Image: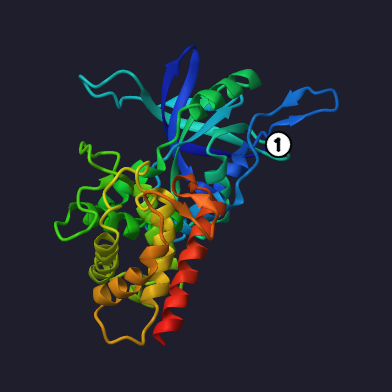
Amino acid sequence: MTAAKLSVRAVRTRQGGNDVFAFFIPGYRLLELAEISKLEADPEGKLSGFQRPEIRSHIRNITEYVNRGAVLFPNAIILALAPGAQFKATRGTKVSGSDPSGEAGTLYLPIMAGRKVAWIVDGQQRSLALKDARNAQLNVPVVAFVSGDIAVHREQFILVNKAKPLSPRLIDELLPEVGAVLPRELSTRRVPSMLCNILNTSLDSPFYGLVKRPSSAVKDGVVLDSVLIKMMKRSIQDPRGALAMHVSSDGGSDIDEMYKVLVAYWSAVRHVFSYAWGKPPDQSRLMHAAGIEAMGVLMDQILNRSDTADNARTYCEKILKKIEPACRWTSGRWELLDRAWNDIQYTPKDVRALSNFLLSQERQVIRVVA
C-alpha cells in the first residue's frame, strides 16, 4: 500500500527508450526511496544485487564533511526507479528557442510501506553518509532512470565505476589550488602539497627543480612528489615531528616556518651528501623513496634536540657529518644492514630498517658529543 508520495520538481528526457529524470531531494530521504542492492550469492552460486560492501571510513569522512555546514555537494546520486513513478509536465513554460532536450514538470515518487521504489546504482557510500549527517536537510542532486531490470542496473553500475579513479598525485597537486572546506582525509594532505610546490619552485630550496609533479614538463625531476608529501605529512602528524611544532592548537599551520625547517635540514643533507644529491634513484639511494622517507624520520629526531644553541642548519650539518661515514648511498654495502647500497627497496621493511639504522647512528653521535 502506498503510504505517501514524494513530489519533486524534475526535468525529464529520454535515453535508449527509457525515461531519465534529474531532480533534488534532501539527503536523508534517499534511503527512504532507494534500496542498496548488495552483491550476494545463494548456496547454488546464483548472484543477486551488485553493490560492493560499504566502506565505513569513507562514509565517516563524507559525513564529517557534510556536517561542516554550508558545503558544496554537487555529485549526483544515480538511481534506478521501478516502473510506476508518475511525471506531470508543466504546461505553458516552454521558452521560444530553448533546448528541447528536456521538459520540466513534477515527478511523483511513491514511498512504499515495507519496500523501496528505487535502487542505488551509484552513490551508496554518499547515501549512507547523508543518512547519518546532522545536515540532513542538504538537498542533493539525483539522476534517475526508469527500469526494473537488474541486468540494466548492473550494466550502469559497471559503466559508472569502470573508469580509472583520479591519481592520488594529481589530487595532491590540485589541493593547494582548492580554497573550499575539504574532507579531513584531503585537508591533511593540503599543507604538505603546498610545501611540495614551494620546495620545487623556490630558488633557495635544496629541492628546486628536482620534484616530479603530474603537471611538470621539467625532465630533471628525480624525487616523486608523493614521497616528499608522505614524509612531510608524517612529520606534521607526529607530535614529536619537526614540522608538528608549527601546527597551532586550532589546527592551523605556519607554512613559512615549516618551509624554513625543511630548507635548513635538507640543505644540510645536500651539503654533507653532495656526491649523492640530485641523482636519479637508481644511482643514489638518498634520492630514492626509501632514502627520502628514512632521512625524513631522521630529520624529526635531529631537530627534536632542543639543547643546542647552534642554528638549525649548522646543527644538522654537524650531526650528519658524523653519520656520513656509515652511509652507503651510491656504492658499497650497508655493513650493519648487510645489504648492498642499491638493494634497499621502497618497502615498509626496508624503510623501517634504514630509518632505524640512521636513528641509531644519530643516538651514538649524541652520546659521544654529550
Which is nearer the eye, 151 or 358?
Answer: 358
How dense is the environment of label 1, judged by Cα within 10 Å: few (below 14), some, or many (20 and up)?
few
The total number of labels drawn is 1
Residue 267 spot, x, y in % from top left: 24, 64
Residue at the image position 40 percent from the left and 70 percent from the top: 300
Quadrant where the N terminus lies? top right
The correct choice, above or below, for 96 with respect to 79 in the image is: above
Q: Where 30 sits versus 326, above or below?
A: above
Frontmost residue, 158 versus 282: 282
**Going by the picture, which residue comes out furthest to the right?**
43
Three-letter code for the amino acid on which mark 1 is drawn:
Arg
SS state under label 1: loop
Q: In which quarter of the image is residue 120?
A: top right
Horizontal side of residue 276 vs 353, given as left or right: left
Relative placement, left or right, of 50 versus 352 is right
* Left or right: 70 as drawn, with respect to 197: right
Asked whether residue 48 appears in the rendered view, the answer is yes
Percent coordinates x, y for residue 106 in the rendering: 45, 32
Identify the residue position indicated by label 1 in the image: 115
- Residue at the extreme top: 17
Going 20% across and 59% down the picture, which residue do you hit? 205
Residue drawn at x 42%, y 67% as measured from the top left? 298
Q: Is residue 83 visible?
A: no
Residue 242 percent coordinates (x, y): 37, 72
Which image quadrant: the C terminus? bottom left
